Image (cartoon, rainbow, N blue to C red):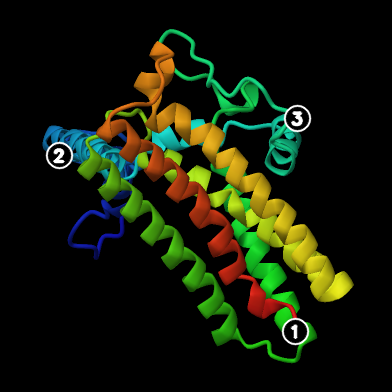
């Protein structure tokens, strides 16, 4: 029974039950208990449009970067020059040291495209020149260390000098080809590959110098100098004298004479640079 002195009825329990019913999930006027700000943001159509527009901009930016990189750094072409295997490396090193018995120097083509280096020992590659350059720098550091002359600055000077001479060679050859007006398929990357093969002979000369002194250095370096001269003559004559070689016509005329002199000059510069970059490493 109600208290006779109570002025108002106690309705707090009923209100609590009613309030709890109104807070039920999915009730009108109240968001669901499981709703989060992230879910509400994703459910917004404007935010979905913004995300789609941002993804489109990111894709366009990536495509633009890829195009510009491929224009200045031909990544697709570089992959071709590193398509080598162990058998190719062994055969190529043998060709660099013993080019005298090799007969067929023509680069093989498949549908007007040169085959990958691992299928053709005559094809230029960048794997051997790159590894030879790194090994040359390491061997130079070893030689300087055995003479108590090693220092990071001197080793850096050795590496930068080799790169500077290589860059100067490439620029000089490209300028000469332009002045002589030679129509050739010889590219800049091909030049870097062919000119980088001399580091293989330089490594052999320095190592023999460390083991056997000056006599071993001069004997091995002399052999490698003659080998690289023959290799460059037989390789570049098919590139620079491609028209005359394809027609089987003897080299005649002033322009062809200039091409022949250019080929011989490039080949003769390799032994000189091999000696210049290594003679101070053996004492």
Dot 1 lies on which element?
helix
Q: Is residue 58 left or right of residue 251?
A: left
User: Is residue 14 left or right of 229 when viewed as pictured?
Assistant: left
Q: Secondary structure at mark 3?
A: helix
Q: Which image quadrant for residue 51?
A: top left
**Whether label 3 touches label 2, CB < 8 Å:** no
Q: Determine the residue positioned at 60% across, 62% down.
A: 274
Badge number at residue 145: 1
Q: Is residue 170 above or below residue 243?
A: below
Question: Image point 73% across, 32% down: which residue?
Answer: 91
Mark closest to the chain's N terminus, 3 or 2? 2
Q: Which residue is mark 3?
A: 87
Q: Quadrant of the C terminus?
A: bottom right
- Which marked residue is nearer to the observer: mark 1 or mark 2? 1
Instruction: Quickly name the residue at label 2.
Output: 50
Say which residue appears at 47% left-offset and 35% top-offset: 236
């Amino acid at each position: 029974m109600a208290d006779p002195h109570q002025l108002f009825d106690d309705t707090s329990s009923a209100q609590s039950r009613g309030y709890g019913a109104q807070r039920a999930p999915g009730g009108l006027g109240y968001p669901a208990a499981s709703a989060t700000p992230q879910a509400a943001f994703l459910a917004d159509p404007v935010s979905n449009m913004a995300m789609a527009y941002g993804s489109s901009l990111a894709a366009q930016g990536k495509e633009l970067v890829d195009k510009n990189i491929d224009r200045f750094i031909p990544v697709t072409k570089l992959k071709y020059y590193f398509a080598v295997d162990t058998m190719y490396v062994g055969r190529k090193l043998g060709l660099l040291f013993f080019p005298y018995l090799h007969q067929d120097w023509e680069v093989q083509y498949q549908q007007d495209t040169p085959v990958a280096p691992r299928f053709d020992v005559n094809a230029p590659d960048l794997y051997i020149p790159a590894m030879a350059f790194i090994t040359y720098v390491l061997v130079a550091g070893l030689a300087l260390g055995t003479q108590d002359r090693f220092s990071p600055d001197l080793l850096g000077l050795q590496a930068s000098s080799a790169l500077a001479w290589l860059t100067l060679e490439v620029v000089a050859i490209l300028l000469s080809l332009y002045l002589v007006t030679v129509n050739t398929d010889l590219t800049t990357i091909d030049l870097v590959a062919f000119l980088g093969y001399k580091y293989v002979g330089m490594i052999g000369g320095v190592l023999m110098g460390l083991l056997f002194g000056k006599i071993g250095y001069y004997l091995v370096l002399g052999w490698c100098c003659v080998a690289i001269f023959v290799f460059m003559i037989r390789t570049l004559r098919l590139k620079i004298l491609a028209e005359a070689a394809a027609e089987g016509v003897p080299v005649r005329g002033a322009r062809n004479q200039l091409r022949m002199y250019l080929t011989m000059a490039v080949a003769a510069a390799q032994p000189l640079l091999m000696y210049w970059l290594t003679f101070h490493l053996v004492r």
